[in-house]
Amino acid sequence: MAGFAYATCALADSRSTSACVSFSVAAICEHCVVLAAAGSGDPEANASIGRLAALARPAHAKLVAAGSPRIVHVSLPRSSHPAAWGRVREGLLLSTPGRLTAAFELPRAGVWDVWLQGQIMPTVGVSVDGHAIASIGAQLGGNSLVLNTMTPVPVSLSAGRHRLSVARGGFTLAPGEGGSAALYGLFLTPASAAAKQPLYVVPPARWHALCGRSYQWIEVVPS
């Protein structure tokens, strides 16, 4: 397969059922095409898939797309939190003891995974509708490009409106408790959703069949 160029399109905005990144080629190596995100939106989503099909057609390759689970985002900008918590990147710096509370709405009842993204050294408590579900701390993975996404916490919830809280307690002399805590994102997915997502395989001529859905990635692979 030397010389064959793989191309991948990553999910741009999981809140939209038809959003995909519009890409420009940044670099090419023997087995891959390195792509840089240029934007998102429905027209660009379809155009991106069409460009991948154009790459696949002369190579007699096919398009493979990994379905993305439904994601329910919890809005940090609309949350209630201490005024002293400043903005950092697209999130909040939990610089003092206090509690963040934010509303979200689920489309159906069932077991949902609660995900946090950020860099959290001190222990913070996570609760839903006033019921504690987890204590999280010493989470410093990720980097400036890839956000640290912590192990999800499963919780059984009814359909409809709920409230999620993240609380930082007072400073103590315990290891890490005086460290920094930055929260970049909160979201929920159906439990074990990632393992249940289908793979869609289509020839380049039928690339329109991939439009209108949300994907983790789309890749050009040899037939």
Image: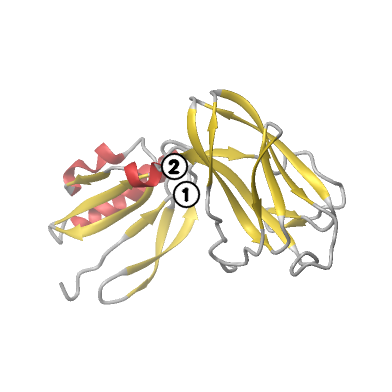
Q: Quadrant of the C terminus?
A: bottom left
Q: Which mark is residue 12?
A: 1
Q: Residue 41 carries which label?
A: none
Q: Residue 19 carries which label?
A: 2
Q: Which amino acid does label 1 sit on?
A: Ala
Q: Residue at horizontal 32%, vertical 38%?
A: 211
Local secondary structure at mark 1: loop
Residue 190 placement (x, y as % from top left): 45, 37
Q: Quadrant of the N terminus?
A: bottom left
Specify the farthest residue to the front: 174
Q: Residue at horizontal 48%, vertical 47%?
A: 40
- When asked about the image quadrant of residue 155, the answer is top right
**Alpha carbon separation for disc pair 2 and 1:** 6 Å
Label 2 vs 1, first from the N-terminus: 1
Q: Residue at horizontal 20%, vertical 57%?
A: 56
Horizontally, residue 180 falls left or right of residue 162, namely right
Q: Residue at horizontal 62%, vertical 63%?
A: 139
- Residue placed most toward the observer, 186 or 32: 186
Q: Confirm or deny contact between disc 2 and disc 1 (CB under 8 A).
A: yes
Residue 123 placement (x, y as % from top left): 72, 57
Q: Which amino acid does label 2 sit on?
A: Ala
Local secondary structure at mark 2: loop
Give the color scheme: rainbow, by chain, secondary structure or one colour. Answer: secondary structure
Horizontally, residue 160 falls left or right of residue 26, namely right
- Note whether residue 55 is visible: no
